[in-house]
Amino acid sequence: MGFLDFFTGDQPPLVKGALDDVCTMLDTGRDMFATASAHLLDNEILEIDLHARHQYVAARVLLVRRAVLEHLNLDPKRELVLCLKLVSVVHEVECIGEMSVMMGRAATFAEGPRFGPMIDSLREIRSQTVDLFDDARDAFLNGDQTKARALLARQLSVNSSLVGIFYDLAARDAAANESMVYTMAAVTLERTGIHLANIGTIVTAPFTLAIPPPERAGHS
């Protein structure tokens, strides 16, 4: 059963338009993340304007919020929970865009190419995170709780790996610039994964506390 199948009777046109915007935002966020992480971690040339893409996403956020508000003004008792879910998911996607912009900024701070075992570990986390984008999109748009729970479980595994990476970064004897760039990379990967997990919780348990960041008080 798809997301819009949950609507009773005719599907509200304003909400259908908002859903189209959410689809576009999720696809844009995935492309931004893939491009920004390749620039930062793989030393590839940045071929898109991340700030412009993020402004595009931010504009879509306003469109979704306006559509939801207009729909609720017309019929405040109809599909209230689903409207709140739409407003919640666009917040998460906008935050993902912000993380991609930060990745691009980290690359501009770097004084040289990024190579070595630490970058290899960050690349592996990046690869796992890219795979979560389609899972988050499908889970939300299809109202698929099974896929959403699988997404949350996979993200917990990624978070567990990030615990070790943060401790390794803290223990490394490296130049200040390299440490800063690699830490920014790790933080943006962490936050991107958490925002994707939050999309999963919108499906499984809306309006509850999402997955917390990795525990850093002790090295498991």
Image (cartoon, grey):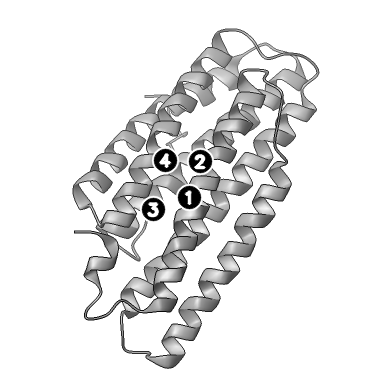
Whether the residues at callouts 2 and 1 have beta carbons within 8 Å, the answer is yes
- The CA span between labels 3 and 2 is 14 Å
Asked if marks 4 and 1 touch (Cβ < 8 Å), the reply is yes
How far apart in space, not on screen, are marks 2 and 1 (Cα)?
6 Å
Q: CA distance from mark 3 to mark 4?
A: 10 Å
The residue that label 1 is drawn on is 26
Residue picked out by circle 3: 199
The first of marks 4 and 2 along the sequence is: 2
**Front position in the image: 81 or 66:** 66
Residue 10 vs residue 42: left or right? left
In the image, residue 193 lies at what x, y percent? 45, 40
Identified by mark 4, the residue type is Phe
Which residue shows up at 45% across the image and 70% down it? 17
On screen, residue 157 above or below 69: above
- Quadrant position of the N terminus in the picture: bottom left
User: Which of the two labelled residues, at mark 3 and mark 2, occupies the earlier sequence position?
Assistant: 2
Q: Which numbered disc covers residue 133? A: 4
Element type at mark 1: helix
Disc 4 secondary structure class: helix
- Can residue 198 be seen here? The reply is yes
Q: Kindly indicate whether the residue at mark 2 contacts the one at mark 4 (C-beta within 8 angstroms).
A: yes
> Can you give x and y, in whole percent of width and height, for residue 213 in the image?
45, 42
- What residue is drawn where x is 42% and y is 64%? 19
What secondary structure is marked by label 3? helix
Which residue is at the front of the view, 171 or 117? 117
Could you tell me the amino acid type at mark 3?
Answer: Ile
- Measured Cα–Cα span from mark 3 to mark 1: 11 Å
Element at badge 2? helix
Q: Position of residue 57 (x, y in %)?
A: 60, 56
Picture quarter containing residue 102? Answer: top right
Residue topped by disc 2: 30
**Pair 3/2: label in front:** 2
